[in-house]
Image (cartoon, rainbow, N blue to C red):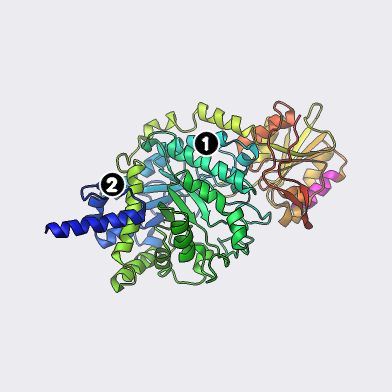
């Protein structure tokens, strides 16, 4: 019996070395080991999955079609997942206000603690800032990562993440799938863009490391969240959206090492808890054609063995087309585990995915020891992040942390350092005698979960008139905006995605043709100036209220613009011609 105990301890110690858990925790009495030894195979496999549930309370209906049970609490009780993820769109609507989110978190945690292995959940969301904001006001809203890149300040990045961390944890969210560690080197990238800090690997890595520190080290474990750098091995050069296809990254291995790798190295050095995979194929790293999520040469050979990363690896959503083109849903989690991944995010057919893993273990294709490696990583993450010790939050206390005046003011100050003036050839800025101001152009108030109304917000800040033309202006909307411009003294037009919007280009041309002074502002990706020749161009990198307030201060001359372009902007019809170089940024 003694010999058997020693053998078990030695076996567990070996698992802990592989999983990155401190070997000192390998004693048979340690929490992670005790829990693991008491878990059934089914409970272990459940920990490998992060599910998305429909509902704003634990008892809301809406999950029957996907899960076979109706409420979020019943989903947790049946599938016993390791985690859940929150969204705020029509597909998975979990967010109303911060106190409601806190109550939802508590309801799901109680369901988890009363079922299966009685383990609390990792509760995650994507709160990157900018357009990827799952919980908006009255929570504190944040500028996009590329705006932070324009500000160049690692301390601002750390402070932003620290505030975000405290607010999320107050709502019962203990993991943020942020920061985006991709280097947006491709101006045509359809899915990353301003979610990236920069096209410069060194700047991106410096700000990634700062945010990791802010998320994970800005307070006691129960006051911080687990940070997740994404999307390894780097989504920044993609020309295809991995939600709808499988991007092929054609870089050489040397180019990948020089451009895409450094921010992930910085994240690992900073002690990142989690790394998220990319559904991309990189032939120079793995010629098999498999997406990186399912690639053992990338996930084990590079991430685990070469880079020495021993934390949790989570897939990007398994509902995305980029990972579903070559294999059935039941096979994808098995391949991911074989590649070296630990957690499966948002499987579209949860029962098929879970049963696929169980069948692979029962057939001998996957060993239970391999499952244990990933479960130990997940358990240790829950322990060290304080989720085990403090799974519940006080919804009555949310208002003392979330959206406080101190947080709002701090984020406003750092956002004030990000607005970038690219061109001021007509000398319009700052506005001193602007007269009657018209604000027009892009917004999208109907977008589910992300109401975008920057035209009205900016007009209110400037004391001007708002004439929104939406995301894709119809001829009558263009005519109304041009007519309003003729009746105005100064015109400000917001743009978003000029490359693919002939209607927005027509709007700008019509406004310029009036002869009125026109100031163009690109409010998401900074590349729009390559598609319209306007003498005055400004970049903000996102359209949230906090950013529009900073923009108004710059336009009015209340503050000087401090942002420096974190990418280069090419001419739209001549990609090799740079119109605005990296580091461009006028001031006064």
Question: In which quadrant will I find the N terminus?
Answer: bottom left
Query: Of 464 and 320, which appears nearest the observer?
Result: 320
Residues drawn in magenta: 504-512
Of discs 1 and 2, which sits in the foreground?
A: 2
| Disc number placed over residue 388 in the picture, else none | none
User: Which element is circle 2 on?
Assistant: helix
Q: How many numbered badges does the structure rendering display?
A: 2
- Taking the image as shown, residue 160 lies to the left or right of residue 528, namely left
Splitting the image into 4 quarters, where does residue 106 fall? top left
Q: Residue at x 50, y 47 (%)?
A: 267
**Residue placed furthest toward the bottom:** 363
Is residue 97 visible in the rendered structure shown here? no
Query: Of 60 and 372, which appears nearest the observer?
Result: 372
Q: Main secondary structure of the magenta part?
A: helix
Q: Is residue 16 magenta?
A: no
| Disc number placed over residue 158 in the picture, else none | 1
Give x and y (percent) for residue 582: 71, 45
Give x and y (percent) for residue 471: 68, 50
Identify the residue under disc 2. Answer: 24
């Amino acid at each position: 019996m003694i010999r058997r105990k020693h053998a078990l301890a030695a076996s567990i110690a070996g698992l802990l070395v592989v999983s990155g858990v401190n070997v000192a925790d390998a004693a048979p009495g340690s929490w992670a080991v005790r829990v693991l030894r008491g878990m059934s195979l089914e409970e272990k496999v459940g920990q490998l999955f992060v599910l998305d549930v429909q509902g704003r309370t634990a008892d809301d209906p809406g999950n029957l079609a996907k899960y076979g049970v109706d409420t979020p609490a019943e989903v947790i009780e049946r599938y016993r997942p390791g985690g859940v993820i929150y969204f705020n769109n029509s597909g998975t609507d979990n967010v109303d206000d911060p106190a409601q989110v806190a109550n939802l978190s508590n309801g799901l945690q109680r369901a988890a603690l009363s079922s299966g292995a009685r383990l609390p959940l990792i509760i995650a969301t994507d709160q990157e800032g900018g357009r990827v904001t799952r919980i908006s006001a009255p929570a504190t809203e944040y500028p996009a990562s590329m705006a932070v890149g324009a500000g160049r300040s690692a301390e601002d990045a750390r402070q932003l993440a620290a505030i975000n961390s405290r607010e999320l944890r107050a709502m019962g969210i203990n993991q943020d799938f942020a920061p985006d560690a991709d280097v947006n080197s491709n101006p045509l990238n359809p899915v990353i863009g301003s979610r990236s800090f920069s096209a410069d690997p060194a700047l991106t890595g410096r700000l990634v490391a700062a945010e990791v520190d802010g998320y994970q080290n800005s307070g006691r474990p129960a006051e911080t969240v687990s940070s997740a750098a994404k999307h390894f091995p780097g989504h920044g050069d993609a020309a295809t959206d991995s939600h709808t296809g499988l991007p092929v990254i054609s870089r050489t291995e040397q180019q990948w090492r020089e451009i895409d790798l450094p921010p992930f190295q910085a994240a690992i050095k900073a002690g990142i808890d989690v790394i998220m995979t990319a559904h991309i194929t990189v032939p120079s790293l793995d010629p098999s054609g498999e997406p990186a999520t399912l690639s053992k040469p990338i996930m084990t050979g590079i991430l685990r063995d070469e880079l020495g990363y021993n934390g949790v690896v989570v897939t990007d959503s398994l509902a995305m087309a980029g990972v579903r083109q070559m294999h059935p849903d039941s096979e994808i989690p098995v391949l991911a585990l074989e590649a070296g991944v630990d957690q499966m995010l948002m499987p579209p057919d949860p029962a098929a995915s879970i049963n696929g893993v169980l069948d692979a273990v029962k057939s001998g294709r996957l060993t239970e020891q391999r499952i244990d490696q990933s479960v130990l990583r997940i358990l240790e993450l829950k322990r060290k992040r304080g989720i085990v010790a403090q799974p519940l939050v006080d919804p009555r206390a949310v208002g003392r942390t979330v959206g406080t005046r101190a947080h709002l003011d701090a984020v406003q100050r750092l956002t004030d350092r990000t607005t970038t003036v690219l061109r001021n050839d007509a000398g319009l800025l700052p506005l001193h005698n602007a007269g009657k101001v018209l604000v027009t152009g892009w917004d999208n108030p109907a977008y589910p979960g992300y109401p975008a109304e920057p035209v009205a917000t900016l007009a209110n800040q400037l004391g001007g008139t708002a004439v929104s033309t939406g995301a894709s202006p119809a001829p009558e909307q263009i005519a109304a905006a041009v007519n309003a411009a003729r009746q105005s003294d100064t015109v400000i037009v917001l743009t978003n995605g000029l490359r693919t919007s002939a209607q927005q280009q027509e709007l700008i041309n019509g406004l310029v043709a009036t002869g009125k002074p026109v100031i163009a502002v690109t409010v998401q990706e900074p590349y729009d100036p390559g598609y319209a020749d306007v003498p005055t161009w400004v970049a903000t990198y996102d359209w949230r209220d906090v950013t529009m307030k900073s923009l108004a201060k710059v336009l009015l001359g209340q503050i000087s613009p401090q942002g420096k372009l974190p990418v280069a902007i090419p001419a739209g019809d001549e990609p090799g011609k740079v119109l605005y170089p990296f580091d461009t940024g006028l001031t006064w």
